[in-house]
Amino acid sequence: MKLIYDAAYAVINGNEPEHLGEFWWQESNGALGKWNSREVAHDYVAANPGTVEALGKNGSTAKVLAYHRKSNPDIRWIQTEADSTKEDNLITLANNH
């Protein structure tokens, strides 16, 4: 199991962040790692469903899912499963980065 504990925005064209672009995670054995793009994160989550969660406030977690744009499968990203709270959203982690 990987737990995403931090995320950061990517700035592609200009000064404004365009999307989440970096993700720091910890495995259940304590090993640390980082995905340097949303595509790399997507590909891992898609290949390993149910094995990635995101850390939320107060130690809560949420499942992380892989998505892609149907009209252009090259546009890929990850996000947390909807659960009616924002505390465990990846954007919240990036906003706190």
Image (cartoon, grey):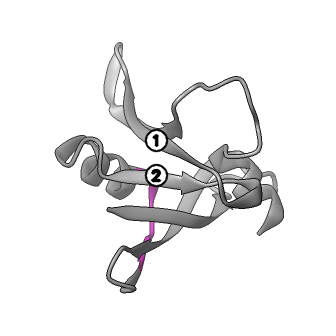
Say if residue 97 shows up in the picture: yes
In screen coordinates, is 77 left or right of 8?
left
Residue at 36% in and 86% down? 31
Residue at 68% in and 53% down? 56
- Element type where label 2 sits in the image: strand
Magenta-colored stretch includes residue 34:
yes
Q: Position of residue 93 (x, y in %)?
A: 71, 58
Q: Which mark is residue 63?
A: 1
- Element type where label 1 sits in the image: strand
Say if residue 14 shows up in the picture: no
Q: Position of residue 77 (x, y in %)?
A: 45, 40
The quadrant holding residue 40 is bottom left
Residue at 35% in and 13% down? 71
Residue extending furthest toward the left:
47
Instruction: Look at label 1 and name its amino acid.
Output: Lys
Mark closest to the chain's N terminus, 1 or 2: 2
Give the crowd class for mark 1: few <14, some 14-19, many >=20 residues within 10 Å.
some
Circles 1 and 2: CB atoms closer than 8 Å: yes
* C-alpha span from label 1 to label 2: 4 Å
Magenta-colored stretch includes residue 97:
no
In the picture shown, does residue 68 fall above or below 57? above
Foreground pick, 97 / 36: 97
The region drawn magenta spans: 33-38
Instruction: Look at label 2 and name its amino acid.
Output: Glu
Name the residue tied to disc 2: 53
Q: Quadrant of the N terminus?
A: bottom left
Q: Quadrant of the C terminus?
A: bottom right
Foreground pick, 45 / 87: 87
